[in-house]
Amino acid sequence: MKLTMKRRIFIFGAGASLVSVPLWAAEQPAPLVIAVMDPLALELACSCIPGFAQRKYRVLAEHLQKELGRPVVCVFSESLRATFTRSPTGKIDLLIGKDDIVKHDAKEFRLEIEPLAKLTDLEGKTTHHGIFVVEKNDPARMLEDLASHKIIFGPEHSTERRVEPVRMLRSSGVTIPGKPYSSTSEKDAVMEIFENEDAAVRVCALVAAQSLKLMEGCQLIERGSLRILERTPEVPFIAAFTAKAPGPETVTEIRKSLLAFGKDEKNCIALESKKGFIAYEKEKEKETGHRA
């Protein structure tokens, strides 16, 4: 199971077996490179729960290759930096991952991106939420009860593990330390609950709802050993963005191809999606990255 920032990378060309070097004929145009950062992608998750976290982006690559008439290569990693280093063209044309992470990483690389579409889940939603979890026997019953707890947040850019939880706690009158405890790894955050040896301080961790499901499904934690105290509002989950590099005509073609992907039921099954991709509400907006 991979709930942390793993530096593992997988590359493949549509229509080919998983290989370390993509295959395409020399006379073909340069490949369209997709950076897949979806934590529920087959290459980035575990296979403990049948039909969940096994999204086959190879099927999307094959669809885009057919629609665009050019080779398509996928690079899988939770780190945009890592995908750049292994891209066969030295650039990334399409990014698919958590909305907040893609935007954060794009800013770090000063990469101008444009949102194209959102991926629906099996229920047809394009959002997810974070959860406050405590040990099952923890006496806390509401957010106000966390005033004396050690709260483990996610990184600063995480909407469901940091931004929304901080807002909710402040609204409930809970004081947030100037430098909150945080962990990029959701697994490590949860383990602090069980490994805490300070009887005077209890621990609460923020994780994404799907991550708790995976941790229980992979038996990293005992089912029912944690209790969900509260959940955050729904926030954007997986979205597709294009970099400025492909050019305006290609961007339009990619958007059209993404929106057509869900018309085939087999495609939806491959990405564990009800409707495939739907239009991004703010598709005309651009996220431009600048270093602080």
Image (cartoon, rainbow, N blue to C red):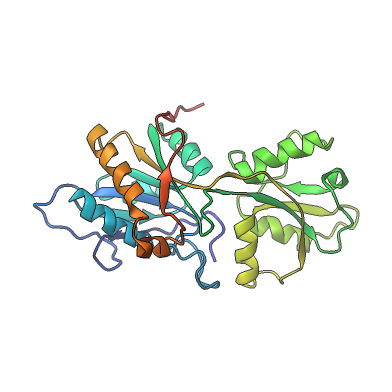
Residue 49, can we see it?
A: yes
Q: In this picture, is 216 found above or below 246?
A: below
Q: Residue at x 23, y 54 (%)?
A: 65
Residue at the (66%, 50%) spot, across then down: 130
In the shown orientation, is residue 159 left or right of residue 29? right
User: Relative to 285, is 232 above or below?
Assistant: below
State the image coordinates of residue 168 (x, y, percent, origin top left): 75, 39
Q: Is residue 155 left or right of residue 110?
A: right
User: Where does the image place residue 281, in percent across and percent down from the top left?
Assistant: 46, 36
Seen from the viewer's position, the closer of residues 153 and 173 is 173
Residue toward you, 156 or 72? 72
Q: Is residue 156 left or right of residue 100?
A: right
Can the viewer see residue 92 in this picture? no
Which residue is painted at 65% across and 46% down in the image? 161
Above or below, 140 against 291 in this view is: below
Question: From the viewer's perspective, is 142 left or right of 255?
Answer: right
Of residues 278 and 289, the one nearer the viewer is 278
Q: State the residue lying farthest toward the left.
A: 27
Provide residue 51's location: percent of width, then percent of height: 50, 70
